[in-house]
């Protein structure tokens, strides 16, 4: 499933109409039929108010109104702008509606009886503004939207909650708080942003007949990564595999005061199928975690007086030997010692390199070396770390997460796993995947270490894009499984996630 902006949606619709030859009125008819079917399925023959704007979103509204009325359902249709404003496909659907014998009223003619009207209706269908929104909301929409939101009626939005843009534009105006949004054909970017997702309510995508052949013309390729994608992209190990085929993994993690991070990242990697795993860390960390992670081998690396890792060049070269992937970061602490270690690995380790947590703090200083690297480099920042890397405020990162992750991945030729609800994985070629699993039970210190362990294990056994997107999905899915079992999200800990990985991994062998 693709994720698009309003402009991109308009571009695939234009190709559908102009090149493929499927007229816009047919797409609108399809949209109307799908939405009417859903409404009847959901609410039966309740009483509907359909509020219509002058663009094609309003055209969808006329198609829905007609189809509901054809079923004998009570519908009041009202339009906001003057009827002379309707043009093109929307005008055509308005005419079809009228020629079918149905009537509409002007919003301003019925507004004074709004409170009485509310007693006679159950569901409001919002067909005011869709992907065509431009700039700040103009009158009379803010006042109307306020009224609708206060009505305490179920509001169903067509394509987008009116007032919400499809893309990453920030809004400072009213917008419809929908109980449900039927998004047409493709998902819209704003569904994945903290500021705008709440307006959507439950979101469902309905097909309207735009042929998939048009999607390859999209300049930016963004896809949802969910159970289907995980299942279909997975390559199972050969039954003749030996431990060496399943990745010889090296993890540099922990410091004397932070053995926990090293333990979590290592255990998660073991539980995710790492063939042979070596942890490079300080002697006290090894003593603290060795009995928890029986499958791991350990290499003692030099530490400074504060118990922070400060490996020598010789130790690092020895550590890279035979490794198919190296991960640096969880629990290594902050300071100059980290920069030396990270820069060394960027320059001298010839395999996929994963940088997480404290290692991310020095990435901004290493970009020249990173751009010269041939092998994949993967970074796993949360919005705060992404802010440090790019110079943006955290709020800007959250609002423009697609744009910023993509630009950083492309410019530096790296993989960016921008974490948070709906984690984005951005590839060096600009392709993006967006995660559909996970819940607030993951918002705990240590969850990120578990994810990094999973990525470390999968990255040598799957295509990098698949390894990253699938790790993120399964990590979130493990938390979702607890929620499904009735756990409160407060009780889900990073250690629980690891314990649930065997169940989460069942998705790769069979769909639930
Ligand atoms: N055949 C097709 O193309 C198909 C399109 N489809 C549907 O069309 C939708 C896109 O249609 P669209 O491009 O016509 O724009 P749309 O969302 O109706 O908005 C334009 C209207 O909003 C108004 N408006 C805008 N900004 C505003 C503001 N700040 N404040 C106030 N008003 C503002 C603007 O008013 P104006 O600025 O012109 O005064 C105009 O009236 C898409 O979401 C999907 O539902 C599907 O049926 C498939 C087939
Ligand atoms: N509210 C949430 N919904 C879904 N996933 C979340 C949420 N909060 C955090 N996560 C996920 O949990 C992990 C937290 O990682 P991070 O912030 O690096 O934690 P830490 O470094 O303490 O281990 C990330 O994978 C992130 O996507
Ligand atoms: K709408």
Image (cartoon, grey):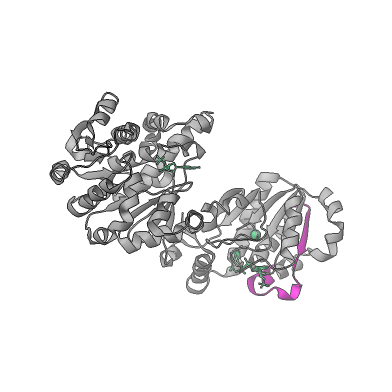
Q: Quadrant of ligand 1?
A: bottom right
Whether residue 322 is in magenta: the answer is: no
Identify the residue at horizontal 83%, vertical 56% (top origin): 114
User: Is 423 in front, or is 510?
Assistant: 423
On the rendered image, what quadrant is the C terminus found in?
Answer: top left
Whether residue 92 is in magenta: the answer is: yes
Task: Say left or right for 161 vs 213.
Answer: right
User: Is 156 in front, or is 27?
Assistant: 156
Task: Say left or right for 183 vs 425.
Answer: right
Position above or below: 16 against 39: below
User: Is 440 in front, or is 262?
Assistant: 262
Indicate the quadrant where residue 459 lies: top left
Indicate the quadrant where residue 260 lies: top left
Span of residues in magenta = 72-93
Could you say where residue 169 lies in the image, as x and y percent from the top left? Answer: 55, 63
Could you say where residue 259 lies in the image, as x and y percent from the top left? Answer: 32, 32
Could you say where residue 147 lies in the image, as x and y percent from the top left? Answer: 76, 55
Q: How many marks?
A: 0
Identify the residue at horizontal 50%, vertical 40% (top origin): 439
Q: Is any atom of residue 172 visible in this view? A: yes
Identify the residue at horizontal 51%, vertical 52% (top origin): 192
Could you say where residue 110 lies in the image, as x and y percent from the top left? Answer: 84, 61
Q: Residue furthest front?
A: 305
């Amino acid at each position: 499933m693709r994720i698009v902006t309003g402009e991109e949606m308009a571009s695939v619709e234009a190709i559908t109409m102009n090149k493929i030859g499927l007229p816009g009125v047919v797409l609108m008819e399809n949209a109307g039929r799908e939405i009417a079917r859903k409404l009847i399925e959901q609410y039966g023959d309740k009483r509907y108010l359909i509020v219509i704007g002058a663009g094609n979103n309003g055209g969808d509204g006329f198609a829905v109104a007609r189809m509901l009325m054809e079923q004998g359902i009570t519908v009041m249709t009202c339009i906001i702008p003057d009827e002379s404003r309707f043009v093109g496909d929307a005008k055509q659907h308005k005419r079809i509606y009228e020629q079918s014998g149905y009537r509409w009223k002007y919003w301003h003619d019925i507004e004074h009886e709004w409170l009485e009207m509310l007693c006679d209706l159950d569901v409001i269908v919002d067909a005011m503004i869709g992907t065509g929104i431009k700039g700040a909301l103009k009158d009379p929409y803010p006042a109307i939207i306020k009224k609708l939101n206060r009505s305490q009626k179920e509001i169903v939005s067509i394509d987008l909650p009116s007032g919400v843009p499809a893309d990453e534009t920030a809004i400072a105006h009213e917008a419809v708080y929908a109980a449900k949004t039927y998004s047409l054909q493709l998902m819209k970017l704003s569904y994945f942003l903290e500021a705008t997702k709440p307006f959507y309510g439950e979101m469902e995508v309905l097909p309207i007949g735009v042929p998939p052949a048009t999607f390859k013309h999209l300049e930016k390729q963004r896809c949802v990564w969910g159970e289907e994608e995980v299942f279909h992209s997975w390559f199972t190990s050969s039954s003749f595999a030996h431990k060496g085929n399943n990745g010889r993994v090296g993890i540099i993690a922990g410091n004397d005061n932070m053995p926990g991070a090293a333990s979590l990242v290592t255990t998660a990697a073991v539980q995710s199928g790492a063939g042979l795993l070596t942890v490079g860390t300080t002697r006290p960390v090894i003593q603290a975690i060795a009995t928890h992670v029986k499958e791991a081998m350990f290499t003692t690396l030099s530490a400074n007086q504060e118990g922070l890792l400060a490996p020598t060049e010789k130790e690092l070269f020895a550590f890279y030997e035979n490794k198919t992937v190296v991960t640096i970061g969880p629990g290594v602490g902050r300071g100059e010692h980290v920069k030396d270690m990270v820069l060394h690995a960027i320059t001298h380790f010839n395999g996929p390199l994963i940088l997480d947590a404290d290692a991310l703090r020095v990435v901004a200083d290493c970009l020249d070396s990173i751009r010269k690297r041939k092998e994949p480099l993967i970074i796993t920042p949360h919005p705060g770390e992404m802010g440090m890397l790019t110079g943006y405020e955290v709020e800007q990162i959250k609002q423009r997460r697609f744009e910023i992750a993509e630009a950083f991945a492309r410019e530096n030729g790296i993989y960016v796993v921008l974490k948070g609800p709906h984690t984005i994985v951005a590839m060096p070629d600009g392709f993006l995947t967006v995660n559909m699993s996970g819940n607030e039970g993951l918002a705990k210190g240590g969850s990120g270490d578990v994810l990094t362990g999973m990525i470390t294990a999968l990255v040598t056994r799957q295509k990098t894009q698949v390894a990253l997107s699938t790790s993120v999905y399964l990590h979130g899915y493990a938390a979702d499984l607890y929620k499904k079992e009735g756990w409160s999200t407060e009780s889900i800990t990073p250690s629980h996630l690891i314990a649930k990985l065997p169940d989460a991994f069942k998705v790769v062998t069979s769909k639930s």
